[in-house]
Image (cartoon, coloured by chain):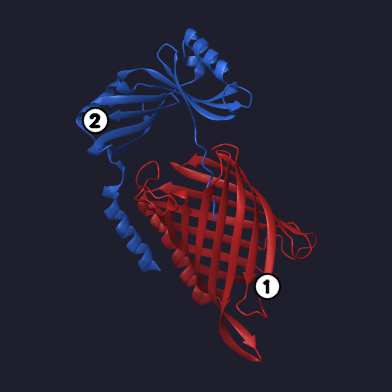
Amino acid sequence: MKTVVALLFLFASFTIGLSQERKIDHRKIPGAMTNYLRQNYAGAKDLEYYQKKENDTLYYETEFTLARQAYNLRFSLDGTLIETEREIEFEELAPPMQENIAAVLQDNFRNARIKKLQAVNPLNKKQFEVYVKTRKGGKYAAGFYRVMFDATGQLLWIAEEELHSIESAF
Amino acid sequence: MQGRYLLLLVGLLGKSLVSLGQQNANLPGFIPSVFYRGHISNRFDYNIFASTTIAQAKSTADGKAGRVRESEIYLQPSLVYKYSKELNMTAGYTFIRTGNFPASAETEQQVWQQIIFEHGALRGAMLHRFRMVENINANVSPSINYQFAFEKPLQGRMLEEGEFYFTCFNESFINLSPGASRIYPANWSFAGIGYMTSRAGKLEVGPLVQTTFHNQTEGRTTLYLLQILWTADLKILHPKR
């Protein structure tokens, strides 16, 4: 049995290079990325670094918390910032933005409850990603939805989240 | 980080092997298992779990002591209601058949309901499962099983194809029957390494220790099993072209 476990770990070490994402040591990230993080997120805690492959392109990502907010930053291989994701509270948004988002949610869903809100900026376009739980009765069926807004609070799109059952054998 | 999980796994394995030499109520064996997860709708899934436990046991027949192969067949379909990503409710049925020979074979049937709650912990996923079980064969004998489990990808943040993960659980069985000789009749512990394939689901291997506590005079029986679990879903029926 010990041999089986040892062989599995040996196999695991070989396949680490094949995976889509792997955790890396901070010494392996580009200097430009280190400098950017030091200058802009000096008090960051629990920093973790990953190398990620998406559509045959390699990226670096870092995940950390700062002032009790969760951040996820993506960098190119030379250490240039590509995208920022930051979990925020609804109350942090400007009042007109809050009103726009609330109006869209009320128009489409019944009793939409915001589960998570993220400020993101893919391709340098500021957007807001809202995860909501809704009840039966609106334009959309009861369930979980991901709603995307642009920087002004205009609705971009709505997508239902796919629920997967929690796996538990025996 | 991977070394820590390996240490836990080897520790459980080593403890099992050491104990094997010390107590005669310990039985080695293995347990091949299959878990299939089917999709019905965004709110409902169904699961089918099947396993067979194969262990060597001492027995006495016609006044002669010998070793026989003891087995237990376990078949368990269930229906899952996905309340949210973090909370599921399940109702299921379990058929258990023990013993190899028709004369000694025993069957047990159970219906059960469970709640599973999952949350993030240590950059992995922790699961708490409360299962209320009613035995429908003999007198109604309810019990509550509590399982806590932990799973963590060994490479990135999410488990992806071609990656390994660490998994472990402990399940406590609490007997609620009035007049039960043991309130805590059994405990199962498992720690293993899994691998996510691209099309054929997940494969898990590791030691599963099943302990049954008898009354005070009979002590306990412990099965030290090598569990091999294959978890599959719809992808196996509809592979990518």
| Disc assigned to residue B106 | 1
Q: Chain of mark 1?
A: B
Viewer-nearest of labels 2 and 1?
1
Q: Nearer the viewer, residue A39 or A122?
A: A122
Q: Nearer the viewer, residue B101 or B14?
A: B101
Residue A42 in sight in this render:
no
The outermost residue toward the bottom is B63
Give the SS element for disc 1: strand
Give the SS element for disc 2: loop
Compute the Cα span from label 2 to label 1.
Answer: 63 Å
Residue B15 in sight in this render:
yes
Which amino acid lies under the numbered mark 1 shown in the image of this protein?
Answer: Glu
Left or right: where does residue B49 sit relative to residue B143?
Answer: left
- Which residue is at a point 68% across and 53% down the rendered structure image? B112
- Which residue is at a point 33% across and 23% down the rendered structure image? A122
Left or right: where does residue B124 sit relative to residue B63?
Answer: left
Q: Is residue A79 above or below residue A125?
A: below
- Which residue is at a point 74% across and 61% down the rendered structure image? B136
Q: Position of residue B126 (x, y in %)?
A: 51, 45
Q: Is residue A75 above or below residue A16?
A: above
Q: Nearer the viewer, residue A8 or B94?
A: B94
Chain B shown in which color?
red
Q: Is residue B223 above or below residue B192?
A: below
Q: Is residue A37 above or below residue A24?
A: above
Which amino acid lies under the numbered mark 2 shown in the image of this protein?
Answer: Ser
Chain A shown in which color?
blue
Where is mark 2, residue-wise? A76
Q: Based on the displayed image, in which of its 4 quarters is residue B48 positioned?
A: bottom right
Q: Based on the displayed image, in which of its 4 quarters is residue B192 positioned?
A: bottom left
Left or right: where does residue A51 sit relative to residue A168?
Answer: left
